[in-house]
Image (tube, helix red, strand yellow):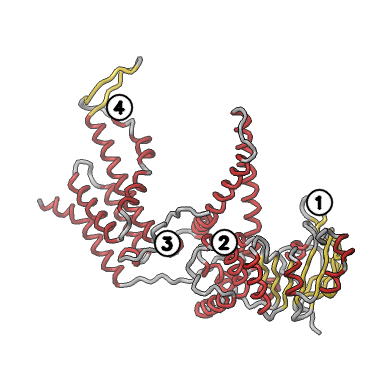
Amino acid sequence: MKHSFIDEYSDLDSFIHRLDPRTKLIASLAFIVAVVLTPANNWRIFVCYFCVIAVLLILSRLPPLYVLKRSLVIFPFVLLIAVFIPFFKEGELAGSYNIWMWQVSVTYSGLFILANVVVKAWLCILGLILLSSTTKLADLLKGLKQLGTPQVMILILSFMYRYIFVLVDEVMRMQQARDSRNFGGNRLHQLKTIGNMVGTLFIRSYERGERIYAAMLSRGFDGQVRTLHNLSFRPADAYFGVIFCMVLVSPYIIWWLG
Amino acid sequence: MDKVVDIKSVSYTYPDGNQGLKSVDLTIYPGENVAMIGPNGAGKSTLLLHLNGVLRGNSTVEICGLPMEEKNLKEIRKRVGLVFQDPEDQLFSLSVFDDVAFGPINMGYSESEVKQRVTQALEWVGMSGYEHRSPHHLSVGEKKRVAIATVLSLNPEVLVIDEPTSNLDPRSKWSLIELLKQFPMTKIIATHDLDLVRALCQRTVVMDGGEIVADGNTEDILDDIPLLKAHGLAPR
């Protein structure tokens, strides 16, 4: 079965795609730090950063609608965490409501913080979408490894990416087999069936893990992971890194001068 | 003649108490193509896992004159290329290149040698140009070929394959059989596919209940209908 991949557009070709994964990783991290550290009342800087990421997204030739859709995925999470802030923050009241027996009030400063959180989260996720859609996951992991991420983490991520779709296929087959035997009955029975399926999936994954390990042993695996290093840091990476950092810092310099 | 595989009285009991193998003896000479047939649960796959030391029962196994000991494991695994039944298990890397290169890298070959071996192995199985594809995106037939390439890149003296033609449509099956015919090394193939046995192997070993019940010329064994019937291998 076909699945949409995390790095779906990573085999397009553009200036951004061709950058070394390490450059992109560090640039993304710098971008996130810069966004998070921007004071909330400096909305001009957010606009600058949005322009930066928009230009990069256009350069990368990713379909804009795809990027927009992907970026919306985080909103439920952000809202779930941040939606209560306007109710608890003290300050000038924006509105006050009676809900059953509670007196609930919303403050302007609370709303302001909520907006700030949402904007920052959105900018960060745009940066990450740019990173993950322009870099093949294998290259990204290689980059992470060369930047010093522990080997165990890299292995876990790489096996996850390799086998998550195999598992999804297995679940879908199990669902089809279940539904073709008239899955139904009461809630309790349904829950039991789903519990059994989860258990079966666990055992199958465990056994698959054993077989994969045997296959690795058969080809001389001895616990030591070795890879070929074929990432190359080119002049373009250096130019991009320097210019990108300057762009990130420039709003502050302008703000400080003016 | 030198023996490639020399197994004397291999027994193996599974952790759950089931006896997988009961005192199996098997000798295989260079250049032989040996089919291993038998019903499900006969112990074929278990025996194959003994050939490169993934499983080690209380037994004497010698591969190319090397006794199965800890210090010989690496050399033995270089000489015996074991291909598992499910390519999904055999191919665990994010790209075809990484998978085919896994063995050679573990053996400590230089970067240029690894690359050359990968190119060569993929060429052998007719999968050149697939280096940067993800194994998940290949068809079953393609996966089987790449799975074979992952052991060919070690230049093994013995190619051991578990069910090479399972899940393949007839066209992919026959093209795989043609491919296997071209490989000069000793081959041991566990299968249910009697077409494959007839087309490829001169010698056939019949296993049932963890024992070898017959061993001989393929034609003699496949024409021995009572024998095949007794072990659940005949059509009717």
Q: Name the residue rendered at 60%, 72% in the picture.
A: B149
In the picture, the quarter occupied by the C terminus of chain B is bottom right
The numbered mark 4 sits on a residue in which chain?
A
Circles 1 and 4, Cβ within 8 Å, touching? The answer is no
Q: Mark 3, residues whose alpha carbon is within 10 Å: few (<14), some, or many (≥20)? A: many
Q: On the same chain: label 3 and label 1?
A: no
Circles 3 and 1, Cβ within 8 Å, touching? The answer is no
Q: Amino acid at mark 3?
A: Lys
Q: Name the residue rendered at 33%, 32% in the picture.
A: A83
The residue pinned by badge 4 equals A87
Q: On the same chain: label 4 and label 2?
A: no
Numbered disc in front, either 4 or 3: 3
Query: Residue A104, how many percent across, how many down?
Result: 30, 21
Q: Give the spatial CA distance, label 1 vs label 4.
A: 64 Å
Query: Residue B76, how many percent across, how many down?
Result: 70, 74
Query: Residue A162, how many percent across, how many down?
Result: 53, 57
The residue pinned by badge 3 equals A136
The numbered mark 1 sits on a residue in which chain?
B
The residue pinned by badge 1 equals B17
Q: Give the spatial CA distance, label 3 vs label 2.
A: 16 Å
Circles 3 and 2, Cβ within 8 Å, touching? The answer is no
